[in-house]
Amino acid sequence: MVDITDWEQVSSRVKYIIKEIDPIKLLPVLELAGILGEQDGQCISAVCTAKGPIHATQNELLVRLKKRGPTAFPNFVAALRETGQSHAAQLLDPTFKGKHSIYLPKCFN
């Protein structure tokens, strides 16, 4: 079951993090983790090109992630950290203690 409070946190902080997230950097990590499919990545990438990264993050990436089950949020936060977007990760999950995710494949840990 998805922890609703995780995604409520995202919704309440989206205006602070939206400009800091580069969805293109996140796609390979989230695809390899099985959180997003290749088709998701292609769609997000196309929207990013057509309408910009802020629109792609808010209207494609976050919408899709919210539907991906209980590991989507921790994988999203870990992917942010793994791709050098740790400030956004810290805003979303200030209690994150570890440097690496237990969810992401070993090649990213």
Image: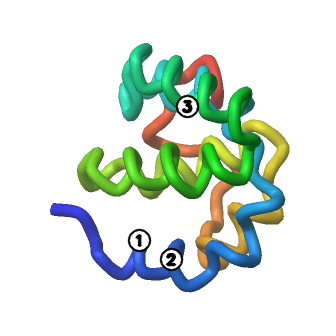
Are the residues flagged by discs 2 and 1 in contact, CB closer than 8 Å? yes
Q: Give whichever of 25, 42 is nearer the camera.
A: 42
Rendered position, 30 above or below 56: above
Residue receiving disc 1 = 7
Q: Is residue 9 above or below residue 67?
A: below
Using a 10 Å C-alpha cutoff, classify the residue at mark 3 as few (fewer than 14 neighbours), some (14 to 19) or many (20 or more): many
Secondary element under disc 2, as helix, strand or loop, is helix
Q: Amino acid at mark 1?
A: Trp
Q: Mark 3 vs mark 1: which is more N-terminal?
A: 1
Q: Nearer the viewer, mark 2 or mark 3?
A: 3
Amino acid on which the number 3 mark rests in the picture: Ile
Residue type marked 2? Ser
Residue 70 spot, x, y in % from top left? 27, 55
Image disc number at residue 11: 2
Considering only vertical position in the picture, is 66 above or below 41?
below
Is residue 20 rendered to the left or right of residue 58? right
- Tell me if 71 is positioned left or right of 47 in this view: left
Q: Position of residue 34 (x, y in %)?
A: 37, 25
